[in-house]
Amino acid sequence: MNSPRPKIEHLVTAEQGGQVLGALLATLARVSANEARELILRGAVWVDRRRVQQQETLVPPGVELAVHFPPSGSYDSLAITARDILWEDDVLLALNKRPGWHANYTPWDVWGTLPYALATFIRDRDGHEPQLHLAHQLDRDTSGVLLVSKHPAVNPALQQLFAAKTAEGGIRKTYFALAAGQIEAETFEVRTGHGRGRHGLFRVYPLEQVGQTLPYGTQRIRAMETQFSVVARHPLATLVKATPITGRTHQIRLHLAHIGHPIAGDTRYGGPASIGTRALDHHLLHAARLEFSHPHTGRYIQFAAPLPLAWQAVLAELAMSQPA
């Protein structure tokens, strides 16, 4: 693995203006012409906050040129195959997302992300460019069921399904999480506020502050609710099933950290970096099932994704059976 490079931010001078992007980038980043070409094609180069992927673009003076490099020092390689598809019809596709897959383009890369890999797979299989849209989001290290729209006509109905609560006909989502420590209650519910903090990171706010303006921004604090039940226990960790009632960013991760039992591997929110003898390179949160009425046919369908191999090894060490 290469050492990560810091982001380049450069205001193009009058003398540099008018150059071809590839040549200017090679000089600024001190890379070869081929390396500059790859950076541009991968989507790592931005001109005035817009991604530019044409190396022959002429760069005017006075614009801000930014170059993003992968934080790990190397690019991800992602290829989707037929075995990653859980279910598919003319307008929807359910994908079994693996931990480590970026669900969206990153500032430093397009090629090594799920949308690009999935579009490549479908284009090679079907012979045409698909019109894909992710119906919801999963964090980079969260595995499991990810629903994808294949036709723009279905997108509004999908948005309504995900916006509605389960009791109101919305999509029912079931997750499994391995929480640090022992949780005593068999079932419990966590209800809080949700919003960004001082440095832009998401955090929990008191429930009574829901509706108030965030102290570090212009948006309002929103309600966040999750129902939990314990599946299995070990002195080091508790396996829980989580059903999010609302759909806030990092919701399950935040709620488990809030009650003092952060997810194993979730070092961002205080989770342990290892369980027993096993080091964890990602958090153990898995989107196990999605259940909903198909927006076109009305048929009730559900998809289930098996636990990744990394999960299976950890559960075996803790003598926990895999949840159904």
Image (cartoon, grey):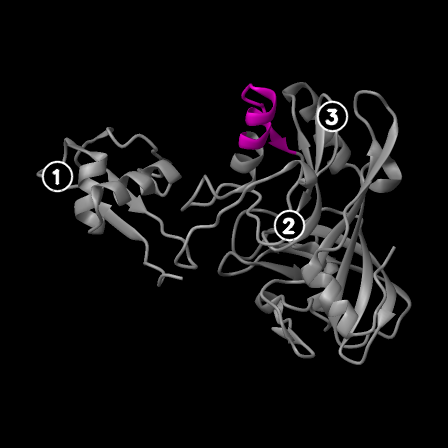
Indicate whether residue 323 is drawn in magenta.
Answer: no
Residue at the disc numbered 2: 98
- In this figure, which residue is indicated by the disc labeled 1? 16
Image quarter in which the N terminus is found: bottom left
* Front: mark 2 or 3: 2
The amino acid pointed to by label 3 is Ala
CA gap between label 2 and label 1 equals: 43 Å
Residue 225 is at least partly visible in this image: yes
Of 227 and 207, the residue lying toward us: 227
State which tag comes first along the sequence, 1 or 3.
1
The residue identified by callout 3 is 157
Which of disc 3 and disc 2 is earlier in sequence?
2
Confirm or deny contact between disc 2 and disc 1 (CB under 8 A): no
Precedes in sequence: disc 2 or disc 1 = 1
The percent coordinates of residue 315 (x first, y second) are 77, 68
Q: Is residue 228 left or right of residue 22?
A: right
Closer to us: 6 or 251:
6
Per the model, the C-alpha gap separating discs 1 and 3 is 49 Å
Magenta segment, which residues? 120-134
